Image (cartoon, rainbow, N blue to C red):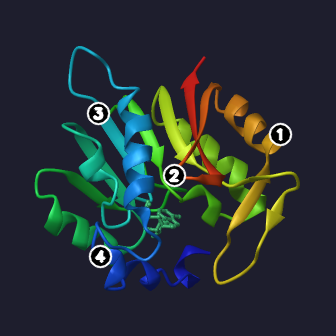
Amino acid sequence: MIDKVDYSVWLTKDRLTIEDNLWSNAQYHADFGAQVRAQYPVDRLARVLEFGCGPGWLIPHLGEVEYHGVDANVQCIELAKSRYLDQQFSVGDIRTWSAESEWDIVCAVATTKHFALHEWSAIVKRILSFAPVAVFSQPIGLVNFDTGVEFPHVFVKETTCLAAIADAGHTLILVACISGNEIEPIITTAKL
Ligand SMILES: C[S@@+](CC[C@H](N)C(=O)[O-])C[C@H]1O[C@@H](n2cnc3c(N)ncnc32)[C@H](O)[C@@H]1O
C-alpha cells in the first residue's frame, strides 16, 4: 500500500540534481522526453499529464507544454512546485486521482513497476484512460515477477502488458529501448 512505502530515496541529495542523480536518469529522461515529444499535436501546445512525476525530472525534456504532474509523495510535489512555477502539480494516488481537464498525452516514467502484480493491469488501464496517447516505461520479462524488495519492482510478461493496453482501448504503436536500458523499455500506445 502506498502509505507504507518510503519514497525518501527519491529525495536524496543526488536525486535532487538533474544533471547528477543517483541512477544517471538525466539521459533516460531526455530519451523518454523525445518519445513524448514525438506524439505532440502539430497545431498547438501539447497538454501532458504525468503520473508519478516525482520532483519533475521529465519536465525539462518536454519542451513548451501545458503540463500537470501527479505524485503521491508530498515532498516530491512540493519540490516540483518550487522548481517549475509555471506548471501544475497535484498530490494524488493513481488509483483514485481524477480531474475534469483533458490531455493529449499521459505519461509515467518508472512508475507502473511500483505496483504489485495483482493490481498492475488495473493501474495501467487507469493511466491510459486519461488521454488518447500514452507513453510509459515498464520492465518486461518472460515471466511475471514481483521482486518483493523494499517496495514492488514488478516485471510483467509481454502478454500481460499487451492485454492491459487492449483492455484500456489502446493499441501499441511503439516500443523503444533507450539509454542502453533494454530491461525497461518505453511503451507508446494510442487509443483505437
Ligand atoms: C521510481 S519513482 C519515478 C519518479 C520519476 N517519474 C522519475 O522518473 O524520476 C516512482 C514515483 O511514483 C510515485 N508513486 C508511487 N506510487 C504512486 C501512486 N499510487 N500514485 C501516484 N504516484 C505514485 C512515487 O512517489 C515516485 O515519485
10 Å crowding of disc 3: few (<14), some (14-19), many (20+): some
Nearer the observer: mark 1 or 4; the answer is 4
Considering depth in this image, is 61 or 67 the residue closer to the camera? 61
Label 1 sits on a secondary structure element that is helix
| Residue 18, image x, y percentages | 29, 67
Which quadrant, please, contains the C terminus? top right
| Residue 50, image x, y percentages | 39, 49
Query: To which residue does mark 4 refer?
Result: 16
Q: Is residue 189 above or below residue 135?
A: above
> Which amino acid, by three-letter code, is at mark 4?
Leu
The mark found on residue 179 in the picture is: 2
Tell me which numbered mark, 4 or 3, is placed earlier along the sequence. Answer: 4
Q: CA distance from mark 1 to mark 2?
A: 24 Å
10 Å crowding of disc 2: few (<14), some (14-19), many (20+): some
Query: To which residue does mark 1 refer?
Result: 159
Camera sees residue 25: yes
Q: Is residue 70 above or below residue 116?
A: above
Q: CA distance from mark 1 to mark 4?
A: 36 Å
| Residue 23, image x, y percentages | 47, 71
Tell me which numbered mark, 1 or 4, is placed earlier along the sequence. Answer: 4
* Residue at image coords 50%, 39%: 135
Q: CB of mark 4 within 8 Å of CB of mark 2? A: no
* Residue at image coords 33%, 60%: 57
Q: CA distance from mark 4 to mark 3?
A: 25 Å
10 Å crowding of disc 1: few (<14), some (14-19), many (20+): some
